[in-house]
Image (cartoon, rainbow, N blue to C red):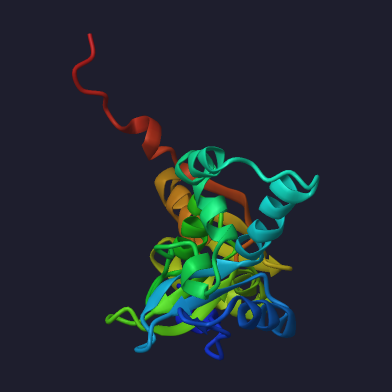
């Protein structure tokens, strides 16, 4: 049971064209109750993402430079525009979504497993990923909240999937599931079978944890000869 992005993504996506005005972007974020939206071109290709932080850059730099009625000299402003704060400074001057967005966007596809999408979000520190088709066109969006849906599978469904998945190793294994936590009990012929059964169960979507209470008749892990020893 591998859940794909297409199973949890939102297809009714709030997005803006790269030519959309600052005001239009701000209104959309507020009306939709989201903190960021994809930016697309006229053919719905994803160009980037614009967030609340991108819009707030304008206010941040206003306060920093003009809050005390001091306008820095041109040389200082050029230095900021080229330095480590250059991205924020440039966005503070932006008037359209294309000016304000962070680009390129980190995206995923409908066929991507949700586990991979979660890892991508963690790697880049983002809360959502635009979902694109093979041509790079926007078809949906997946958020952290969407990914949590994989843990809402019914216990009986998880139990069935665990039994089906560990079928080759499950002779003598009993499976019980409570609130997504799988407990494996019973006795299997070999230690390796117990290890495989636990690993297979752990990798299923919706499984919160696996409690391993399996026993075995022969410890074939210990019995494996070590070659090259003295």
Q: Quadrant of residue 8?
A: bottom right
Residue extending farthest to the top is 230
Pick whichever, 34 or 141, lies toward us: 34
Pick whichever, 39 or 151, lies toward us: 39
x and y percent of residue 77 in the render? 55, 44
Which residue is painted at 22% across and 8% down in the image? 230
Q: Quadrant of residue 35?
A: bottom right
Task: Classify residue 173 as left or right of residue 220.
Answer: right
x and y percent of residue 200 in the render? 46, 59
Q: Is residue 132 above or below residue 101?
A: below
Pick whichever, 131 or 79, lies toward us: 79
Q: Is residue 102 above or below residue 108?
A: above
Task: Classify residue 144 as left or right of residue 227.
Answer: right
Pick whichever, 223 or 51, lies toward us: 51
Which residue is painted at 55% across and 72% down in the image? 95
Would you say residue 163 is visible in this rendering? no
């Amino acid at each position: 049971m591998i859940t794909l992005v297409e199973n949890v993504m939102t297809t009714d996506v709030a997005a803006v064209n790269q030519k959309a005005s600052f005001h239009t972007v701000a209104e959309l974020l507020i009306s939709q109750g989201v903190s960021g939206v994809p930016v697309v071109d006229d053919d719905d290709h994803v160009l980037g993402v614009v967030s609340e932080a991108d819009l707030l850059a304008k206010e941040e730099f206003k306060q920093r430079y003009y809050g005390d009625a001091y306008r820095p000299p041109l040389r200082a402003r050029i230095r900021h525009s080229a330095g480590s704060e250059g991205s924020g400074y440039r966005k503070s001057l932006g008037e359209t979504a294309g000016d304000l967005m962070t680009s390129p966007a980190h995206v995923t596809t409908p066929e991507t497993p949700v586990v991979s999408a979660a890892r991508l979000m963690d790697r880049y520190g983002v809360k959502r990923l635009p979902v694109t088709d093979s041509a790079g066109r926007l078809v949906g969006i997946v958020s952290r909240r969407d990914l949590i849906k994989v843990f809402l599978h019914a216990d009986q469904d998880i139990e069935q999937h665990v039994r089906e998945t560990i079928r080759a190793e499950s002779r003598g294994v009993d499976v019980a599931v409570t609130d997504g936590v799988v407990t494996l009990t019973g006795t299997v012929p070999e230690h390796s079978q117990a290890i495989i059964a636990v690993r297979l169960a752990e990798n299923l979507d919706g499984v919160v944890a696996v409690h391993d209470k399996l026993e075995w008749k022969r410890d074939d892990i210990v019995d494996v000869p070590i070659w090259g020893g003295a």
